[in-house]
Image (tube, grey):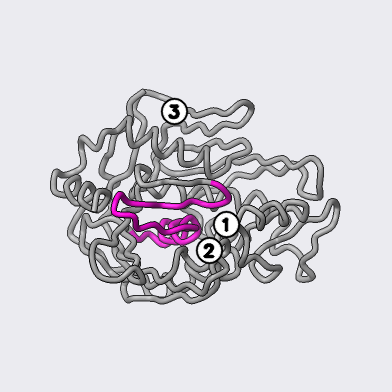
Amino acid sequence: MRAIFQDTGAFQQTIGASVTFNGVGLHSGQQCAATVRPAGADAGIVFRRLDLGEGVNEVAASPRCVRNTRHGTTLAADNGASVATVEHLLAALRLAGVDNARIDVFGPEVPILDGSADIFLNAFNEAGCDLQPAPRRGIALPDGPFTVRDGERLIEIVPGERCVIDITIEFADCIIGRQSLRLDLAAVTDCARMASARTFCRVEEIDLLRAAGLARGGSLENSLVVDGEKLLNRSGLRDAQEFALHKALDLVGDLYLLGVPVLGRIRAVKPGHDLNVRMAQALQDAAEDRSVPAERRARRSVAALA
C-alpha cells in the first residue's frame, strides 16, 4: 500500500506568540513546564529538554522517535533526551492549525493540566497563527484503504480530501459501555468537543499504575475516574460521549506525529496509543517522504538523530 504527501492548497502556519504552560506531570508527579514558540517554515514540531542542561537535547515529534505507548506517548532521541505525554499538546497544535513549533520543556513530560487539550487549544487560539511562505502538505492514500489491526481492534483510513473520524470504544464492564461517534476536523464545534474531553481510567487500575511508576500526578482534577457504574468526579461529565471523544483526541495527537494532517476518513475501533502510533509509523514508512522537500527531510533527520 502506498501513501503520498500532497499539497492541501493552504499555507503552513506557526504560532503567533510564545505560550507557556505549567503544571504537574501525569505520570512523573513532578512539576513541569512547556513553552510553545514560533518556528520557521518546514521546521516541523521539535521538543527541547532545557532542564537537561547544555548540549544536544532535541527530540523530534516523529513516529520514528516514539519509545513508549503505555498510557501515553513518549518520544526519545538517540542522544538520551525524552519527553512523555505529548499527545494532548500535539492534538491541540493539529486542531489549531500549527505546522511548525519549537517546544521548550522543563521536566520529563508535558504538563497534564486538566487532562484535556482545552487549555492548550484556547491558548493557541488566543495567540493566533502566522502564515508562512510554504505550502502545507497532507498525507493521502491514492491506492485505497490503509489498515492496521490488533485482533478486533483496528484503525482504517479511507481516501478523502478532508479528515473525518468514526470512532467506537467499548468498556462493557463499567459505566463507559459502548460509545460511537463521528467527528469532522473541519468543524469548530467537533474540535471543541474533542479538545475538552479528559483522560480517564478505572479505579481498579490506579494501584497497578502507581506500582509501575505511572499516574503519580493523577487526581480527580486532571482525570476522570470510573468505579463500576459510578463516576467519582463530582463535576460529572463535560459531554455524554466524553470517553469516546478523548480516545479520538489521543488518536489526533498521535497521528500528528507525522507533522501533517491525514487526508481521509478514519475509522477507529477500540484504538489506543499503541495502535495509533503503529498507524502513524506505517503511513510514514509507506510515504517514504518522497515528495517532502530535501531540506525538510534533512531537518527531520537531524532532529531525530540529534
Residue drawn at point x = 41 percent, y = 60 percent: 93
Residue 135 rendering spot, x and y as whole percentages = 22, 51
Residue 249 rendering spot, x and y as whole percentages = 54, 53
Residue to which mark 2 is pinned: 117
Magenta residues (range): 70-98
Q: Are marks 3 and 1 in contact (CB under 8 Å)?
A: no
Q: Is residue 213 above or below residue 158?
A: below
Give the left or right position of residue 48, taking residue 298 as reference: right
Q: Label 3 sits on what residue type? A: Phe
In depth, the one of 253 and 60 nearer the eye is 60
Q: Is residue 118 above or below residue 274?
A: below
Q: CA distance from mark 3 to mark 1?
A: 24 Å
| Mark 3 Cα shell of 10 Å, populated few (<14), some (14-19), many (≥20) | some
Residue to which mark 1 is pinned: 194
| Mark 1 Cα shell of 10 Å, populated few (<14), some (14-19), many (≥20) | many
Residue 285 rendering spot, x and y as whole percentages = 32, 32
Residue drawn at point x = 64 percent, y = 45 percent: 181
Q: Label 1 sits on what residue type? A: Met
Residue to which mark 3 is pinned: 146
The tag earlier along the polypeptide, 2 or 3, is: 2
Residue 14 rendering spot, x and y as whole percentages = 29, 65
Indicate whether residue 88 is drawn in magenta.
yes
